[in-house]
Image: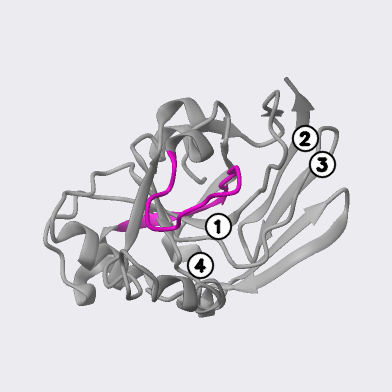
Amino acid sequence: MRPALDHVATGTLFGVALNYRGLLESRLEEFQQPPYQKPPVKPVLFIKTPNTRNGHGQPVVYPKGVERLQPGPALGVVIGRNASRVSAAAAMDHVAGYVIVNEFSLPEESYYRPAVKAKCRDGFCPIGPEFVPAAEVRDPHALTLKLFVNGELRQENTTANLVRGIPRLIEEISEFMTLHEGDVLITGTPEGRVDVQPGDLVEVEITGLGRLANTLVAE
């Protein structure tokens, strides 16, 4: 029997921006401008705060006064044991399993500095529908992600297009901070995010992990 999701994915939710090749390539011209003048050389991290946690089948509130809201299909990696200064070669030994994440966000002005007000609204991080142990996922870098809105396929990509795969992410993050058992590493959302509205049924499907469903409701 699989462990219950709320027993294993209990820690901090770490997001990684710009971790799909198509998304990164679409922003390269922007990154040549001041003040940065080059693409990021390390993972661009942000945190989905505890108030953003949400579950399968639960409503997601469309905030009052917001013009646009965008879901973000993502593979979530659940850390199984503490990881500090872990090499890429040993990184997968620290992975307990996987889960679907829908990383809702308001449109952002800067990918270098993901805004708290865009990322951290209440309920903006549904996780589910269940935890899938690592042993049941043959290759986490060959999974298809699909986003459906009201039953219509609106976005599709694959984890084969990650800029940094899971071992490299764990290596680079654990170099300066400990990833703890129960933390969830949100590996990134693909390019082509779509707008959704109150009343929409939003579903994320990932190969072998099921389908995470949430309905938007107006505040």
Amino acid marked by disc 3: Leu
Q: CA distance from mark 1 to mark 3?
A: 17 Å
Nearer-the-camera pick, 173 or 9: 173
Q: Is residue 97 magenta?
A: yes
Amino acid marked by disc 4: Val
Marks 3,2: beta carbons within 8 A: yes
> In the image, residue 136 lies at what x, y percent?
50, 64
The quadrant in which the C terminus is found is top right
Q: Secondary structure at mark 4?
A: loop
Which residue corresponds to the image point at 71% horizontal and 69% vertical from the top-left?
Answer: 156
Amino acid marked by disc 2: Thr
Total of numbered circles in the picture?
A: 4
Q: Is 119 above or below relative to 99?
A: above
Residue occupied by mark 3:
201
> In the image, residue 2 lies at what x, y percent?
50, 46
Residue occupied by mark 4:
137
Amino acid marked by disc 1: Ala
Q: Residues within 10 Å of mark 4 (few under 14, many from 20)?
A: some
Q: Earlier in the sequence, mark 3 or mark 2?
A: 3
Magenta-tinted stretch: 95-115
Q: Residues within 10 Å of mark 1 (few under 14, many from 20)?
A: many
- Residue found at the far front of this picture: 34
Residue occupied by mark 2:
215
Residue occupied by mark 1:
74
Q: Residues within 10 Å of mark 3 (few under 14, many from 20)?
A: many
In the visual, does 102 lie left or right of 34?
right
